[in-house]
Each structure stands twice: as structure tokens, then as C-alpha cells.
Image (tube, rainbow, N blue to C red):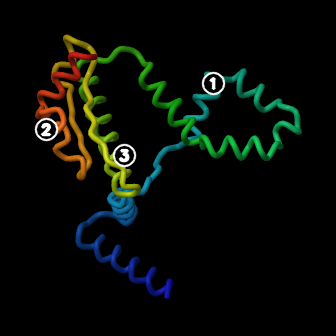
């Protein structure tokens, strides 16, 4: 039964590939993203190399732990419950990006747009997968440069939240948030 189903799925992807001129890897990536599933095209080894370069002493010390500490199953289990190595390296990579040298106004705008897309995608997939709802306002904090950097995103079930609860449209709520930043 499963084999027949998988064959049907493969046939559907092949047909779709021929109709749309997208390659199969592109189609599968687009499909997983549309279903709210994570598609990691991130090379964590490269991020870890940068992490190791900046935290050499801590990593060497961690690797030099006593054998009984390294093999402590309870400690490993607790660590895996809290963070995966991808979470830690993603946080490190984002912190490295945020801590880089000053950007031009155009670069800040592009970074802001990427952030908005990333946040919106994460919220929408969480809403689809887990039933979470969110209403988010994002804005820049540099007064004379970030006047145009503002974005409001609501998940489908939270639509109209700011209009009903705050009695403010998107532009008004962005202005209020900018006043607080």
C-alpha cells in the first residue's frame, strides 16, 4: 500500500516538474515549505567552524572533560531536550550577523525585509502546524534612517487584532511602536 502511494507521489511530482519546468529538488523544497515543514539548506559545519574559531578555549575545555562527565547519559538527555546543535549554531550565526559592522540604509532595508519574511514564514508555519496565532509589529530603531522600516503581520485567525483591540490600522500601530523604540 505504501509503495503504491509513494509511486503515485513520485509520478505527481514528475508530472508537475514537466508542466512547470521546475526541477524535482525545487518542487520538493517548495512543497515542504508550503506544508510548514523545515527545509534546511544550511551547512552547519561551516557555522561550527566559525563558532570554534571564536570559542576555541571553551570548545577545547568541553572536549577535555573527564570521561565520566562526557558519557553522563542524564546530562546528555537534558541538553538534547533543551537545545539541538542546530539551535545553538543558528543563534550563534544570527548573533554574528547582528553584531557585524554598520550597514548602509539600503542594506538595513534589505536585511529588514528578509527578517520580515523569515518571521512571517515561521509564524505562519507554526499556526498551520501547532495552531499558534500571533500578531507582530516589527520596526527599525535608528530614528533618521529607519522611517520606512515597519511591518505588521498577523496569522489568519489573528487577523484584525490591532483594529479591534488597539483601534489602530497597520500604519498607526507601526507609528505607536516606533514611538516606544
Give me the disc on residue 53: 1
Instruction: Work out whether 102 lies above or below 86.
Output: above
Which residue is painted at 24% across and 52% down in the image?
Answer: 157
Is 149 left, or right, of 82 in this rendering? left
Is 44 left, or right, of 159 in this rendering? right
User: What is the CA distance from the residue labelled 1 to the residue labelled 3?
Assistant: 30 Å
Q: Position of residue 44 (x, y in %)?
A: 56, 41
User: Which residue is farthest top?
Assistant: 144
**Would you name the residue on which mark 2 appears?**
163
Q: Earlier in the sequence, mark 1 or mark 3?
A: 1
Which quadrant is home to the C terminus? Answer: top left
Helix, strand or loop under label 2: helix
- To which quarter of the image does residue 99 belong? top left
Helix, strand or loop under label 1: helix
Q: Earlier in the sequence, mark 2 or mark 3?
A: 3
Q: Earlier in the sequence, mark 1 or mark 2?
A: 1
**Would you name the residue on which mark 3 appears?**
122
* Label 2 Cα neighbours within 10 Å, binned few <14 / some 14-19 / many ≥20: few
Give me the disc on residue 116: none
CB contact under 8 Å: marks 1 and 2: no
- To which quarter of the image does residue 142 belong? top left
Q: Nearer the viewer, residue 124 or 117?
A: 124
Which residue is painted at 30% across and 77% down in the image?
Answer: 15
Which residue is painted at 28% across and 36% down in the image?
Answer: 136
- Give the mark toward the camera: 1 or 3: 3
Is 46 left, or right, of 57 in this rendering? left
Q: Position of residue 24 (x, y in %)?
A: 37, 66
Instruction: Work out whether 142 lies above or below 125.
Output: above
- Give the mark toward the camera: 2 or 3: 2
Helix, strand or loop under label 3: helix
Amino acid at each position: 500500500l505504501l509503495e503504491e502511494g509513494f509511486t503515485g507521489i513520485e509520478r505527481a511530482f514528475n508530472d508537475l516538474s514537466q508542466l512547470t519546468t521546475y526541477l524535482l529538488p525545487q518542487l520538493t523544497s517548495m512543497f515542504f515549505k508550503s506544508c510548514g515543514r523545515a527545509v534546511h539548506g544550511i551547512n552547519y559545519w561551516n557555522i561550527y567552524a566559525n563558532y570554534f574559531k571564536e570559542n576555541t578555549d571553551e570548545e577545547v575545555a568541553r572536549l577535555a572533560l573527564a570521561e565520566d562527565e562526557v558519557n553522563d547519559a542524564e546530562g546528555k538527555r537534558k541538553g538534547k531536550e533543551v537545545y539541538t546543535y542546530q539551535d545553538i549554531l543558528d543563534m550563534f550565526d544570527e548573533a554574528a550577523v547582528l553584531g557585524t559592522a554598520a550597514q548602509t540604509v539600503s542594506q538595513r532595508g534589505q536585511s529588514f525585509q528578509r527578517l520580515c519574511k523569515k518571521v512571517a514564514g515561521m509564524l505562519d508555519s507554526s499556526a498551520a502546524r501547532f495552531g499558534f496565532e500571533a500578531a507582530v509589529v516589527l520596526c527599525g530603531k535608528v530614528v533618521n534612517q529607519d522611517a520606512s522600516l515597519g511591518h505588521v503581520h498577523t496569522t489568519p485567525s489573528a487577523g484584525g487584532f490591532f483594529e479591534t483591540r488597539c483601534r489602530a490600522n497597520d500604519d498607526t500601530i507601526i507609528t505607536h511602536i516606533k514611538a516606544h523604540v
